[in-house]
Image (cartoon, rainbow, N blue to C red):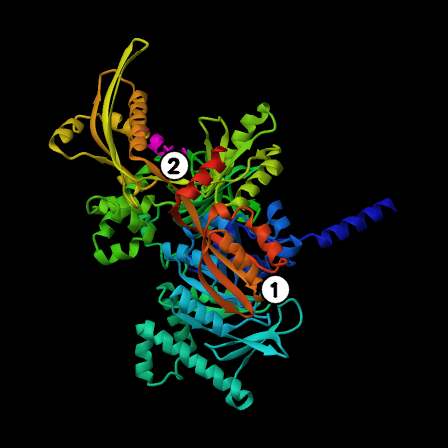
Amino acid sequence: MKTLRAFNYYRKLLRNVQTRRYCSAEERKEKVKNNKIRNIGILAHIDAGKTTTTERMLFYSGTIRSMGEVHHGNTVTDYMEQERQRGITITSAAVSFPWQGYQINLIDTPGHIDFTMEVEQSLAVLDGAVVVLDGSAGVEAQTLTVWRQADNYKVPRILYLNKMDRSDADVTACVRSIEDKLQVTPLMLHWPVQHEGKLIGLIDLVSLEEIIWTQGRGQNFSRRKLTEKSDGKVWEISLNQHRKVIDTLSSVDDELAEMIIQEESLDNLDIKDIARAIRRSTIAMKAFPVLCGSSYKNIGVQTLMDSVVSYLPSPFDGNVIYKSFDTDLSARVFKVQHDDQRGVLTFLRLYSGEINKGQKIYNLARDQSEQTGLLYVALADEYQTVEKVTAGNIAVVSALKATMSGDLITSTNAAANRAKERLVSMLKDPSVKEDLILPNARLRLQAMDADPTPAEVAEVLLGIGNTVPEPVFLCSIEPPSAALQPALEVALAELAREDPSLRVTADDDTGQIVLAGMGELHLEIIKERIIREYKIDAELGPPQISYKETLVGTAQETLVVDRKIGNAKQQVKVTMSAKHLKGVTADKVLKFDKSPESAANLSHAHPRHLQAVRRGLAAALLRGPRLACPLVDVQVTLHWLEVSRGSADSTVAAAVAQCLRKVFSQAESVLLEPLMSLELVVPESHSARLLADLARRRADVQDIHLRHGTKVIRCLAPLSELLGYSTTVRSLSSGLATFSMEFHCNRQMSPRDEEKAIRSVTGF
């Protein structure tokens, strides 16, 4: 009897467990040709429905047997405890699934601005992206941010209007907001079908078919060709929209325009020719397909996956830079994660060649070789060991110690040199060069003093990593006892390696460990992870604003060091000046005096001593004279450097730092505070209270407009006035308002506000 009860218990347990099916990498290699792979990401504003859409894709592809929900905390890609508790995505998660003979490798990304680094890291390795919009809101604040990030990496995109089941969803308003705010050409390929006020399906404006989802969990749907006889007005409206799509396409795609001229009609085109034109326009980013659906109501997800396969590029439609590696391995690191059982896991996107288990790799960014351990393919937080992974796919390797996110790896140093040579020859063609240079690479090239040579351009293109945003919040962190200090330092080192937007520094004056992050939520999540994952009951200090300083004047100083340390005589003479220079790039912060006398002196300076000068400069810029905050927009000139034989490099660095502190205090500095771009969505009935509150917070209101009975308020406000703002918004709007904010710029403070900031930081 006991045996029977136990058997029934385990049978029920197994019935309720979410089962996930895999196929090995070897099987996939046989089934999936390289041109049948799609590496895509899902990007969106907070709560637009990214994770819900991903969950539906996994379900309809047969990868999982039951759909989880964000509000139930049981989705595949939101696997962290903090994600399930809060109902938000914090870290990007990679999943792979088959669809119609293709393989889709998908990365689900966070929507919250505090975790924008996760989006940045993912975009660097994507071939295409799906940008999810809330059908009732259109383009929102964070949509603009992720769109700009995708532009920086030239990622082709599809737009998906989600939540079309809502009563206030409006396709026309969404398309208008895409045109106005994103400044791009939308291609409206779907139109929603409503019955008695409910979304039941959509019309495909390319094939002129009506697709209706029937009862069930969204697996059952029927396609029917629209006809003039049976559909009347719907046919007429759909045909007009169909012609509008072709007309828009013909203005951006020359091949389709030629076909229309030959056919002398918009109605005689083959559907396959239209689909090919949409694909060409999408990959060239001349137009962006717009699709409809409601992921939560299980409508439109299959048509979205069809469009991903049809219109977004394969790994070999782009990524021209990596073709320089030919058949050698080339892979970009986009995520580092620490796992309790498997140790350090490094996520790689392979562009060429293949990677094998236990293979030795060469890191171009670090200029060193490393030995890999086991090789995995990932489904969110589950990993399966494989022997090798081929080009176009996402691999996970263990045991890498020095490799960081954004690094480019290959098989050997010789392979890296061969790739550089091929890339240099490719860059000699001006048209190819224009296609290869990404916007963020262009900024680095423009910062160079002289026109870069093809070899220098190749170095920049292969070395380009992620752009790490500047942190805006600071707080101290302390372990519960001195015995746990080493464990806390290890935990913070691991977390900082996973998340480059988290900065960990030690304050020289107080001896405290200081965390710098993207927002209050970011630092709160870090604290929770230390408590849960590392079992250290750490305490965070109150959040502080990351103020910056800049110089208002110019000054010049000479410092002479002449002392004996041990048996060695240390003699250094250094003359330096500093001035304010707006927007100075990191490589132009240090300038050498070109006057004849100074140039003659500096030409004899040892490269080792110049490196020490740079170290001293970096140390001096970390602490301004006003409030010991980092200095920005400052250019330093080295006029004179004399170093006696036997003087240590550390003495040179210390002399430079000391000299510059005198220069900075003479030149005087002012405080700069972070200014945030804030977007509030609030019901009209509560808007007056929130506007009055914003006025008290020194906010500069930029724009107020109506959206379906709610007011959207856009303004610029100092971060110091927005501490704990979420609680205020909830109380003033009875929990009905939402807001999002992101860093806009650093702004000079008025003397009164500066005095107040100094008092809040120093206490006097």
Q: Amino acid at mark 2?
A: Pro
Q: Which residue is mark 2?
A: 630
Q: Position of residue 399 (x, y in %)?
A: 49, 35
Picture mark count:
2
Q: Position of residue 172 (x, y in %)?
A: 48, 74
Q: Secondary structure at mark 2?
A: loop
Choose mark 1 or mark 2, whichever is in front. Answer: 2
Is 288 rendered above or below residue 642? Answer: below
Q: Assess disc 2: are there few (<14), some (14-19) or many (≥20) residues with their C-alpha within 10 Å of its C-alpha.
A: some
Q: Is residue 619 magenta?
A: yes
Q: Which residues are magenta?
A: 616-630
In the image, 364 versus 741, the foreground residue is 741
Residue 483 located left or right of residue 611: right
Q: Assess disc 1: are there few (<14), some (14-19) or many (≥20) residues with their C-alpha within 10 Å of its C-alpha.
A: some
Earlier residue among tags 1 and 2: 1
Q: Residue at x 62, y 33 (%)?
A: 537
Picture disc at residue 321: none
Q: Position of residue 90 (x, y in %)?
A: 54, 48
Picture disc at residue 296: 1
